[in-house]
């Protein structure tokens, strides 16, 4: 059997991938996808612990997280679309009207 | 266990507000020309919710298999959020000008965000707190971009959304690690495993990540960067709601997860929080100096106030917790009142937001100028206004815990803040007016402003009115 | 049974509501009737409540009369606990009755007097605010709340003296007079403040009952106690206009006459006497202070009396008369007869309010003429005013059986029996002076030839003004009967009523033997002197004042000295005011403040602002930066945890 540490390390790695992606990517949609990777790595952690502890709570949480992420995606994409309509760009480096 | 009727009664305020919001969705679909009625429906719904919260106040209990608190602390926050909601709705005159076709959506989103706040304030389980937080945040993402024809609003909305979702990742990771090390997500069950659970590093990291998630919502330095931008770009009434309700609910969750189970006794954690508090007070006040835009300035002010509130958490005694609750009420009312004035002066989205636009306001609109000065003085903390009493209690709690240095920093930074608060008053009272435009206020707005002003004065002169309520929660 | 005591909060509440309504909405309410009625109603309702409480109190056994009603906790710092709470006892209820009773009458009077003034609502708002703060002063159960009221009445006094801010007053403006009153009072307040600090340090509390019960066990002549009482007395000299801080009261006459009657005669200026009476337990243990009080009191009484002899402004004369009568009250306190002082306070409130209101009626009917040399023969034009004024004049002169006689005679007797013949002697002189100057005034105003402008047609004032005059006249006439001393066959109900308050104080005093013969003798002397003073004044001024002029010519130097009020104002200007002004101007302001302090402050401000404008660039507006800082924060915190 694969020890729990492997799962956790993998989830942590996935989280870091998402995090670095948010840091270095410029396109708003890609940034959002990276955030989704982070959320999924958390889901993985939950499932891992759930299985390890033999407790269902962790799996239930995953369903909640998925629902929330779906709602967030809906809202987020709507926001991105309305911004694109006005600005014709999704490069977050150029979206800097509000500063200082 | 199957939920009993009592369970539903316990969460009646939450149920009432959510059903009113759903009802409005239906009305919006069925009747096309009914937009005038939405604010009245919302306000009556919130009033009913307040009634239930008061009704539940005496009996503190847990409902739905220990998922939610009700009564006491929870009722206190439910009442606060309902009042915040009512004030916001009363002040939201400008929404018609920004998007006259979607005023119903505006009301519905505000109501749902308040449901989210109430769930956060009564969560007894990390999952419920998370769900409340997300419900509130998603409503805020949309509300921030409500003026969707304006690029600034879109940008505010996008920044808030990206950073908010990013912070959610940390929050969730924190919950996951806590769950993994304790085997539960219930706050009380976690609390029973202290203090020995703190020897597990993974658990500590989980707690830190949870802290960071809340720190983002509360706007603690260095997780505060979104605040000025989002506050500037959003519709002013929404900004008021974010700055008051958003912050208060995050603090409620903060108290629930940190103070109540822990009585924050972990020294390292306290040290980290104290450094966050110091950084927040400094950055909030010093950055506030350079602002010419009043909404940005109030944004930095709200950051600074998060720092003051955190002092109460750092001192980790019952006086501090009482101080936080007391100050949250005052801060929320004052902030929402100040943003209300800003929204009336603003007149049209994005106009008249610079400090120069407040020149001679005392001549053209003495009432607004007086209310604004009252808010500014209360935010500074000048007696006999309520802000003074609140700050006094927070700092007194720190003195009680022998944290004199943090009090000294708090007072020093308050002095810095004097400059930008008083600058508005100087402009309002000692500069010649640029234009002679008279702002006509609706009765609803006047009611809201007068209510807030009276509360600010009353709680300053007669603090025991609220303190006696607050004291009951932390007699541990 | 429901006790009226618990409704004590209503007494200050009504005037507060009146103030809020008139102050916030007054400019919107156009009708004078409504504004006036709100204001009058507010004060009379308070009076009604206080009467109920009073009657409940006299039906209670003596030991149950004192009660403390706490409204809410106000300040709670360390060991100091200050509540907003009211102490109801014989002294405070008496003061409340005087304030609200005389206050209501003056409010009614003012509705007529202020008719047509553009600041009508402002006036009544201030007046109600004054009543509110004054009630806090007398009802407070601790020094701090009392001080709040003390400052509040000072503020109202300032606002009302300068009420006609656009009018001239004696070569300057009313605002100058208002500022003078405020600043001089601040000197006294300073004493009061320091005294409070000492009290906190010494007794750890500001509550009257606690402080006094601790103080009563301290041996007499204790240094700290002497310091505290002297400082409190400094506060009292400020508010009650005693030497050396009396200079503001004559100038305070710049305010409308009802204000002079209410604030600067009947109520506020007696706050000093009230303070002494309230703290009698401490004063009695400080013999040095008591001597100082008595000496200052008698000096002021005589000093002000002499000035009043030669003044020509009707309100000025009354102002100096007030000073002099206050001096008598302090004399009473100084010899330990606190209840007599309070008795005189009450009778004085009646007849001095009446005198001022009468003077107001005269001024009103002569279109703001205040010089008594330009009056005369007004008796037939203003019959009601004249009649009431005469009663007041007899009362203040101490003619039996009017109220002033009993109180003043009692003071003189106590002064005599305290063992100092000098105090008594000067007191007699002061009483004689009083009779003279007041009848000089009466004669010049009401009798003799008409010296006012011919196109003035004085006529009796409206009934809103005469009714209060008549009521006050009745009170001045019979008000003294509740305090008839034992040797005259009375029962001295008044002293008996106040006895529990001054029990500790009386205990310390040497028991005065009732030497009935001496009392009769002294009484006869003082009445004879008063009658002599009256007759002399009538003789000098009734027919023509050529004799008076001759006398003033003959003693020109003395006359000038008195007419210019002993040059005290000029002396203060030269010795105190100008040097301080010059020093502040050339050294403190232009050098220390502008050059050093301002520069330092400005520099630190500029540096902070510059730094701020530098730092703020970090807020680039690019989401990436924000995420980067966020992550850096996370890393830093995690590093701190790991290391």
Image: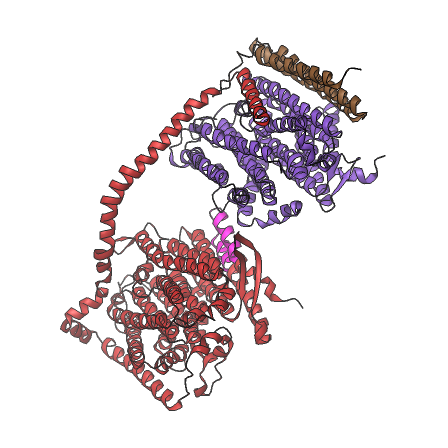
What is the residue that sits farthest to the right in this orientation?
A: B2
Q: Can I make out residue B93 in this image? A: no
* Residue occupying the point 66% across, 30% down: B36
Image colour assigned to chain C: red
Q: Which residues are magenta?
A: C14-40
Q: Is residue C138 magenta?
A: no
| Left or right placement of residue B49 versus residue C110 in this view | right
Q: Is residue B263 above or below residue C626?
A: below
The spot of residue C387 in percent (x, y) is 38, 74
Name the magenta segment's main secondary structure: helix
Which chain shows up in brown? Answer: A
Q: Is residue C58 above or below residue B433?
A: below
* Residue occupying the point 37% across, 53% down: C163
Q: Is residue C36 magenta?
A: yes
Which chain shows up in purple? Answer: B
The spot of residue C436 in percent (x, y) is 28, 76
Q: Nearer the viewer, residue C228 or C370?
A: C228
The spot of residue C299 in percent (x, y) is 29, 71
Q: Nearer the viewer, residue C276 or A45?
A: A45
| Left or right placement of residue B75 versus residue C589 in this view | right
What is the residue that sits farthest to the left in this orientation?
A: C554
| Left or right placement of residue B158 versus residue C266 in this view | right
Write down the quadrant of residue C59 in the picture.
Answer: bottom right
């Amino acid at each position: 059997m694969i020890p729990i540490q492997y799962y956790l390390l993998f989830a942590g790695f996935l989280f870091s991938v998402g995090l670095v992606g948010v840091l270095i990517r410029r396109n708003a949609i890609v940034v959002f996808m990276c955030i989704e990777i982070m959320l999924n790595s958390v889901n993985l952690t939950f499932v891992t612990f759930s299985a390890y502890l033999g407790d269902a709570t962790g799996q239930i949480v995953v369903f909640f997280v998925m629902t929330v992420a779906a709602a967030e995606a809906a809202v987020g994409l709507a926001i991105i679309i309305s911004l694109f309509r006005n600005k014709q760009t999704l490069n977050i480096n150029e979206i800097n009207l509000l500063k200082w | 266990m199957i939920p009993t009727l009592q369970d539903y009664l316990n969460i009646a305020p939450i149920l009432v507000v959510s059903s009113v919001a759903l009802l409005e969705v239906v009305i919006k679909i069925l009747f096309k020309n009914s937009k005038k009625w939405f604010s009245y429906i919302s306000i009556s719904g919130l009033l009913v919710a307040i009634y239930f919260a008061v009704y539940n106040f005496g009996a503190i209990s847990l409902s739905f298999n220990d998922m939610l608190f009700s009564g006491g602390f929870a009722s206190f926050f439910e009442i606060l959020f309902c009042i915040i909601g009512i004030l916001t709705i009363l002040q939201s005159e400008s929404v018609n000008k920004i998007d006259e076709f979607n005023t119903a959506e505006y009301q519905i989103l505000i109501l749902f965000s308040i449901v989210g706040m109430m769930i956060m304030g009564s969560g007894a389980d990390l999952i419920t707190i998370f769900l409340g937080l997300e419900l509130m945040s998603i409503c805020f993402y949309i509300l921030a971009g409500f003026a969707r024809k304006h690029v600034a609003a879109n940008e505010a909305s996008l920044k808030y959304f990206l950073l908010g979702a990013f912070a959610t990742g940390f929050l969730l990771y924190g919950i996951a690690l806590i769950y993994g090390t304790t085997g539960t997500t219930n706050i009380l069950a976690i609390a029973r495993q202290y203090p020995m659970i703190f020897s597990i590093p993974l658990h500590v990291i989980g707690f830190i990540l949870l802290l960071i998630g809340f720190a983002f919502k509360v706007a603690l330095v260095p997780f505060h960067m979104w605040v000025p931008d989002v506050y500037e770009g959003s519709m002013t009434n929404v900004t008021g709601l974010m700055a008051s309700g958003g912050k208060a609910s995050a603090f409620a969750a903060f108290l629930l997860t940190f103070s109540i189970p822990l009585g924050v006794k972990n020294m390292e954690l306290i040290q980290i929080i104290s450094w966050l508090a110091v950084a927040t007070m400094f950055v909030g006040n010093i950055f506030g100096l350079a602002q010419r835009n009043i909404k940005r300035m109030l944004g930095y002010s709200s950051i600074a106030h998060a720092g003051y509130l955190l002092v109460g958490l750092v001192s980790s005694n019952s006086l501090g917790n009482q101080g936080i609750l007391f100050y949250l009420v005052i801060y929320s009312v004052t902030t929402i009142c100040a943003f209300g004035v800003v929204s009336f002066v603003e007149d049209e989205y994005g106009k008249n937001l610079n400090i120069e636009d407040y020149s001679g306001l005392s001549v053209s609109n003495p009432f607004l100028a007086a209310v604004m000065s009252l808010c500014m003085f209360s935010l500074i903390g000048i007696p006999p206004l309520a802000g003074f009493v609140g700050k006094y209690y927070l700092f007194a709690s720190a003195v009680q815990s022998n944290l004199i240095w943090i009090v000294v920093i708090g007072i020093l930074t308050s002095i810095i803040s004097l400059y930008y608060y008083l600058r508005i008053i100087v402009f309002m009272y000692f500069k010649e007016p640029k234009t002679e435009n008279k702002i006509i206020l609706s009765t609803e707005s006047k009611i809201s402003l007068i209510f807030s002003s009276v509360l600010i004065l009353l709680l300053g002169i007669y603090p025991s009115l609220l303190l006696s309520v607050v004291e009951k929660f932390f007699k541990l | 049974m429901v006790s009226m005591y618990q409704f004590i909060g209503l007494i200050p509440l009504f005037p507060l509501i009146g103030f809020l309504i008139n102050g916030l909405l007054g400019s919107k309410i156009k009708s004078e009737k409504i504004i006036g009625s709100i204001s009058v109603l507010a004060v009379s309702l308070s009076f009604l409540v206080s009467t109920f409480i009073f009657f409940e109190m006299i039906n209670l056994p003596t030991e149950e009369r004192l009660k403390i009603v706490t409204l809410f906790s106000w300040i709670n710092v360390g060991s100091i606990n200050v509540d907003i709470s009211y102490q109801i006892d014989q002294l405070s209820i008496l003061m409340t009755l005087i304030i609200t009773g005389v206050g209501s009458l003056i409010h009614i009077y003012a509705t007529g007097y202020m008719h047509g003034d553009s600041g009508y609502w402002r006036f009544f708002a201030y007046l109600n605010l004054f009543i509110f703060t004054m009630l806090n002063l007398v009802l407070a159960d601790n020094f701090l709340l009392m001080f709040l009221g003390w400052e509040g009445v000072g503020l109202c006094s300032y606002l009302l003296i300068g009420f006609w801010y656009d009018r001239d007053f004696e070569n300057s403006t009313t605002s100058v007079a208002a500022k003078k009153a405020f600043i001089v009072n601040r000197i006294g307040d300073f004493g009061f403040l320091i005294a409070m600090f000492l009290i906190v340090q010494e007794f750890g509390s500001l509550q009257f009952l606690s402080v006094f019960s601790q103080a009563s066990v301290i041996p007499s002549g204790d240094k700290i106690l002497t310091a505290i009482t002297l400082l409190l007395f400094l506060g009292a000299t400020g508010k009650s206009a005693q030497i050396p801080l009396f200079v503001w009261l004559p100038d305070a006459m710049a305010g409308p006459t009802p204000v002079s009657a209410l604030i600067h005669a009947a109520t506020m200026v007696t706050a000093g006497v009230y303070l002494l009476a309230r703290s009698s337990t401490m004063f009695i243990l400080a013999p040095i202070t008591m001597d100082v009080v008595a000496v200052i009191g008698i000096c002021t009484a005589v000093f002000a009396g002499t000035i009043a002899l030669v003044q020509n402004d009707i309100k000025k004369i009354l102002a100096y008369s007030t000073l002099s009568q206050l001096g008598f009250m302090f004399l009473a306190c100084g010899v330990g007869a606190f209840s007599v002082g309070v008795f005189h306070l009450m009778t004085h409130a009646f007849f001095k309010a009446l005198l001022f209101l009468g003077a107001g009626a005269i001024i009103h009917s002569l279109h703001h003429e205040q010089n008594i040399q330009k009056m005369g023969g007004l008796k037939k034009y203003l019959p009601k005013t004249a009649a009431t004024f005469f009663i007041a004049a007899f009362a203040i002169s101490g003619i039996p059986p009017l109220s002033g006689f009993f109180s003043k005679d009692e003071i003189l007797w106590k002064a005599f029996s305290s063992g100092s013949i000098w105090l008594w002697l000067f007191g007699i002189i002061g009483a004689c002076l009083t009779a003279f100057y007041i009848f000089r005034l009466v004669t010049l105003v009401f009798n003799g030839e008409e010296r006012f402008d011919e196109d003035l047609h004085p006529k009796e004032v409206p009934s809103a003004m005469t009714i209060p005059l008549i009521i006050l006249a009745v009170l001045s006439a019979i008000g003294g009967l509740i305090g008839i001393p034992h040797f005259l066959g009375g029962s001295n109900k008044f002293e008996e009523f106040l006895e529990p308050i001054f029990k500790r104080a009386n205990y310390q005093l040497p028991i005065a033997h009732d030497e009935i013969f001496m009392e009769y003798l002294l009484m006869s002397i003082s009445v004879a002197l008063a009658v002599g003073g009256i007759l002399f004044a009538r003789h000098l001024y009734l027919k023509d004042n050529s004799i008076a002029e001759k006398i003033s010519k003959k003693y020109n130097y003395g006359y000038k000295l008195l007419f210019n009020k002993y040059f005290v104002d000029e002396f203060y200007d030269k010795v105190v005011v100008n040097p301080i002004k010059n020093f502040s101007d050339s050294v403190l302001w232009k050098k220390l403040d502008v050059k050093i302090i301002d520069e330092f402050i400005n520099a630190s401000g500029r540096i902070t602002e510059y730094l701020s404008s530098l730092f703020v660039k970090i807020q680039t507006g690019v989401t990436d930066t924000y995420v980067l800082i966020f992550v850096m924060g996370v890393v830093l915190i995690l590093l701190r945890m790991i290391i």
